[in-house]
Image: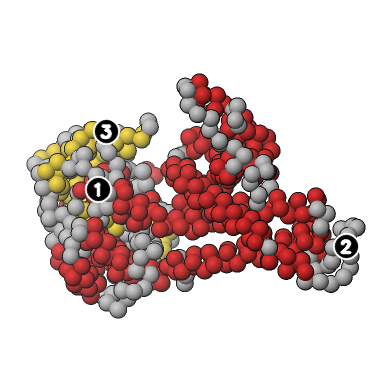
Amino acid sequence: MLLILPIILFLIVFFLIPYANMVYMSFLMKPAEGAYVRQFTLANYARALGDPFHWKVLRNTFWYSILTAAIALVLGYPVAYHLTRASGRRRAWLLVLLISPLLVSVVVRSFGWMILLGRVGLINQLVRSYGGPELALMYNPFGVVVGLVHVYVPFMALAIAGALQNISPDMERAARSLGAGQWRVFWRVTWPLSLPGVFAGTLLVFILAVSSYVIPILLGGSNVLVMPMLIVQMLLDAFNWPLGSALSMVLFGLTGALLWLYVKLLNRALRWSQP
Amino acid sequence: MASITLRELTKRFESVVAVDRLNLEIQEGELITLLGPSGCGKTTTLRLIGGFETPEAGDILFGGRAVTWLPPERRNIGIVFQNYALFPHLTVRENVAFGLEMRREPPAAIRQRVSAILTKVQLAGLERRYPHQLSGGQQQRVALARALVTNPAVLLLDEPLANLDAKLREEMRFYIRGLQREFGITTIYVTHDQAEAMVLADRIALMKDGRLQQLGPAETIYRRPSTPWVAEFIGLSNFIPGTVAARTDGRLSVRTAAGLFACSGDVAAGEVMIMVRPEALHFGPQHPNRIAGVVRERVFLGNLLDYQIDGPDGMRLRVQADPSRIFAPGEAVEVSFAPADAWAVGPRAAGP
């Protein structure tokens, strides 16, 4: 039991306390000069929830994140599938290929995308050399989603691979012996049994995408505004800590609500695994 | 129902030959067991017959029709695995109906056939349960029902009883046998348990290193093993080394350290091992082949006593006898056996 003490202390100092502080901050007032005064108010929440601009940003944030999770699923599933079917050296190599990008900082990878996607980036240079038009691949939602998907696909693939690992090969042999061809084996047996991994992966990628800051700011510029960017603007530029904190709480609450709904759906689809 | 023919069937994994030019004819409606130690190629053979592996060479025929290159879903087979491989996300009913749905049978027919077979395996009433809510024995019967409901040409069983406790295993052996006889379906049963093989099979195919060692009914393999390895694998054996002195009409006279013994065998001359089963060695001089020895150890097995006896020239004999007479360790005894119970095989060193 004592061994768990260090991590609990760590969490309390670096997570719980700052978090509680933010909750506290969200009920304070913003003065003309300075970041906050110790006076109770609900005005922050009124502004956070009342301003249609905030709702637009929230909508965009969730939309980009859902899109990211969906695309990461489509791209990540085949990777996971082949990873589980490979063995020995081939599998080790696939794993290295999948995970090694994570060793490079997100900032560096985003700059890499800027080199590819920019107005005078590699892709545009190639297209223009063939007489094509200039493509707007960056400083817009497209660039942001590309960056987000790229970074989070490995997480999706690993989550799905985990679930696929647990499917016994005899299960698929049994399905084939009963007359199912390769496609039907996948849709009727493999896919349903991999759903726990799919749910875990989409959940994870969604959460990561909602809280992304670096990628939207580098690849979206001033044309894309997501909640983390808005909150940082509020805290650092406007120096309005109470409102920034309230916006954080709103993001937290709404994300939590969405996830709760998702998990409910999940449990219904997976009722066969309940005892 | 179909007969199965395996012709020069060969399967290699990297440098290992798992199945080595196997030739086997299985009659329609027969239950044949593939028996052997781990790594002998029995499971690989089963997978080849099912279409889950492709052979490097050879042919597989069902009822004279070549299926060697057909995928499993086109071979009309039923298979039961050691871990049952029931679909955990489907109910019992949906599991059993799966094969019929794949064949696009009309829903009414599916309902009726599934109900019928579930009643037959005594699982009526459990249709809406999920596999993890069933006991091992019940899961076993769902797996059987699922495999049989489509009326396959061939039934494949891969050590289906290995996960059950001893008592249930015994019950299920007879149950599977009964079901198989009733459906009259050509069946291949893989096992490493020789007692199981002997109870179930019309014929046993004993395999080692990817090759067939002996094929025949249990009694033939038990009483007339073709090699010392077969004799050792099936049941317990005593081996008495000797040299063939004379041979007349399949009757042999073999010179051993304990004297001249009369026995039968396929060997014509040279060094042999006389194989005698422990229950064929009797205390007392009533049979012509006699050995004098001393009891080294005695074990009580309930219905039998198991003795280890030291004979002449370092000979070690194992005798199993009923408890009507009991001999103590250290006692001098005489054991004898009938020529009909003795079978001579080529020496161990040569091997199969």
Q: Residue at point 17% right, 42% down?
A: B67
Location of mark 2 (residue): A31
Q: Please provide percent x and percent y for residue A259.
A: 58, 63
Left or right relative to B267: residue B16: right
Residue type, numbered disc 1: Pro
Residue type, numbered disc 3: Glu
Q: Please provide percent x and percent y for residue B98.
A: 27, 61
Q: Residue at point 49% right, 51% down?
A: A70
Residue most extreme to the right = A33
Judged by depth in the image, the label closer to the viewer, 3 or 1, is 1
Closer to the camera in the image, A205 or B87: A205
Q: Which chain carries label 3?
A: B
How would you rate the neighbour count of disc 3 (Cα within 10 Å): few for under 14, some for 14-19, many for 20 or more?
few
Residue type, numbered disc 2: Pro
> Do residues under tags 1 and 2 come within 8 Å of each other at their CB atoms?
no
Report the label total: 3
Residue most extreme to the bottom = B125
Q: Which chain carries label 1?
A: B
Left or right relative to B48: residue A233: right
What is the distance, in whole Å, between disc 2 and disc 3 at their CAs? 83 Å
Q: Mark 2 lies on which chain?
A: A
What is the distance, in whole Å, between disc 1 and disc 2 at their CAs? 76 Å
How would you rate the neighbour count of disc 1 (Cα within 10 Å): few for under 14, some for 14-19, many for 20 or more?
many
Q: Residue at point 36% right, 35% down?
A: B13
- Taking the image as drawn, is residue B149 in sight? yes
**Secondary structure under the numbered disc 1 in the rendered image:** helix
